[in-house]
Image: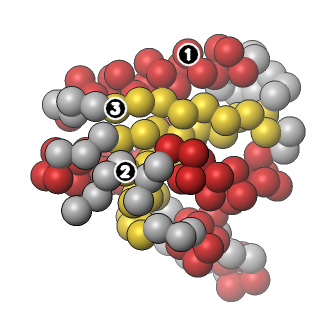
Amino acid sequence: MYRRIMVPVDLAHIAGLDKALKTAAGLSKQYGVPVSYVGVAAAAPGAVAHNPAEFAAKLDAFAKDQAAAHGLSDASAAPYTSHDPSVDLDQTLLKAAEDTGADLIVMGSHIPGFPEHIFTSNAGYVASHAKVSVFVVR
């Protein structure tokens, strides 16, 4: 049914992604497809890593931990670096979907509030603009 599942992750906010991570793992096991965990970090030092190489290593460790925790046979990390992730996160995630060959994006989101009536959330933007299926998990 699917060839690859992409899961955007923010390593600084993993606790809020539990449902999306479990959903992606369940779909991966059910359909026997690999999962790519995509993370986007700033090139400058941040809360998660001091440089892009350290970020890539942490994302790779996260992917391996997810594979072990959920019994996934094929999980990989796809780190991306951005000059300003708060500005170009949406476009970077759309590019990552193409780069990884994902045909399903499983993405966590929060309950919409007042700002989402004015500005689209990241999940809303990706769902509206992706060329592949997007499963938004709250």
- Residue 130 x/y as whole percent: 56, 69
* Residue 5 disc label: 2
Quadrant in which the C terminus appears: bottom left
**96 sits left or right of 69 in the view:** right
Residue type beneath disc 2 = Ile
* Residue that carries the numbered disc 3 in the rendered image: 75
Which of the two labelled residues, at mark 1 and mark 2, occupies the earlier sequence position?
A: 2
The answer to whether any part of residue 26 appears in the image is no
Q: Quadrant of residue 118?
A: bottom right
Q: The residue tagged with tag 3: helix, strand or loop? A: strand
Q: Nearer the viewer, mark 3 or mark 1?
A: 3
Q: Residue at x 50, y 62 (%)?
A: 109
- Residue 107 x/y as whole percent: 46, 58
In this rendering, the answer to whether 81 lies above or below 137 is above
Which of the two labelled residues, at mark 3 and mark 2, occupies the earlier sequence position?
A: 2
Q: Residue at x 53, y 70 (%)?
A: 131
Work out which residue is located at the far bottom of the displayed protein and give it: 117
Q: Residue at x 21, y 33 (%)?
A: 72
* Residue that carries the numbered disc 1 in the rendered image: 57
In this rendering, the answer to whether 1 lies above or below 19 is below
Which of the two labelled residues, at mark 3 and mark 1, occupies the earlier sequence position?
A: 1
* Residue 38 disc label: none
What is the distance, in whole Å, between disc 3 and disc 1 at their CAs?
A: 14 Å
What is the distance, in whole Å, between disc 3 and disc 2 at their CAs?
A: 9 Å
Mark 3 nearby-residue class (10 Å; few <14, some 14–19, many ≥20): many
- Residue 23 x/y as whole percent: 27, 54
